[in-house]
Image (cartoon, helix red, strand yellow):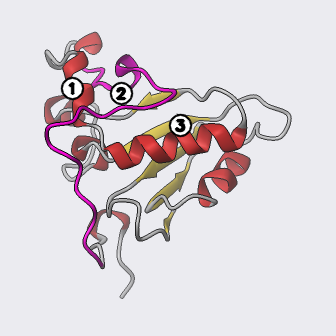
């Protein structure tokens, strides 16, 4: 029986983020990483919620940006459980875990469709990649070690 996206189980031990080190990215700010629920009146999260984003996710997003060769717009990384519920996210959302990002399709000559953006994401070890009309969802649900879940 085929597994659904939400009940995928990792087949290995994912590397853990260092608990005492804040997540850092070369190209993405805390404002881009944080829960955006406060702006919509769903929660009181602030920039400190950016610390909930997986370091491995940030490393792969930096690599994605470098492979595309220009800035990327990320509409969502971390989402607190309250904000996630308010926007209709699934209870086990990778965004709540801090292991997912929604990347909008850029407007570069070599990358201006969601399909092209997905191709670039597939060149990296994201565990999950979802194609949407606005861009792609990428995640590191297994720490970026078990690539292969796509929708």
Q: In the current view of this chain or complex, which residue is farthest to the bottom?
A: 1
CA distance separating discs 2 and 1: 8 Å
Residue 150 makes an appearance in the image: yes
Q: Is residue 126 left or right of residue 98?
A: right
Q: Is residue 111 above or below residue 1?
A: above
CA distance separating discs 2 and 3: 12 Å
Disc 2 and disc 1 in contact, CB within 8 angstroms? yes
| Label whose residue precedes the other's in the sequence (2 or 1) | 2
Which residue: 30% across, 49% down? Answer: 94
Point out residue 77 in the picture as x, y percentages from the top left corner. Answer: 37, 34
Q: Secondary structure at mark 2?
A: helix
CA distance separating discs 1 and 3: 19 Å
Q: Which residue is mark 2?
A: 33
Say which quadrant the N terminus sits in. Answer: bottom left
Q: Is residue 72 left or right of residue 88?
A: right
Q: Quadrant of residue 134?
A: top right
Point out residue 35 in the picture as x, y percentages from the top left corner. Answer: 27, 25
Q: Which residue is mark 3?
A: 103
Point out residue 93 in the picture as x, y percentages from the top left corner. Answer: 27, 49
Give the overall secondary structure of the magenta segment.
loop
| Label whose residue precedes the other's in the sequence (2 or 3) | 2
The verdict on residue 20 being magenta is yes
In the image shown, does 118 or 3 lie closer to the viewer? 118
Give the number of the mark in front: 2 or 3: 2
Point out residue 119 in the picture as x, y percentages from the top left corner. Answer: 69, 55
Residue 49 - label: 1
In the image shown, does 125 or 38 lie closer to the viewer? 125
């Amino acid at each position: 029986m085929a597994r659904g996206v939400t009940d995928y189980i990792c087949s290995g031990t994912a590397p853990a983020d260092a608990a005492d080190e804040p997540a850092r990215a070369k190209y993405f700010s805390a404002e881009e990483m944080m829960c955006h629920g406060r702006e919509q009146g769903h929660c009181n999260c602030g920039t400190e919620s950016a610390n909930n984003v997986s370091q491995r996710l940030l490393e792969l997003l930096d690599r994605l940006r470098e492979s595309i060769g220009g800035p990327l717009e990320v509409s969502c990384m971390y989402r607190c459980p309250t904000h996630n519920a308010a926007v209709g996210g699934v209870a086990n959302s990778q965004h709540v875990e801090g292991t997912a990002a929604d990347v909008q399709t850029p407007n570069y000559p070599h990358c201006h469709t969601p399909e092209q953006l997905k191709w670039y994401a597939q060149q990296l070890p994201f565990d999950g990649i979802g194609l949407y009309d606005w861009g792609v969802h990428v995640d590191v649900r297994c720490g970026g070690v078990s690539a292969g879940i796509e929708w």
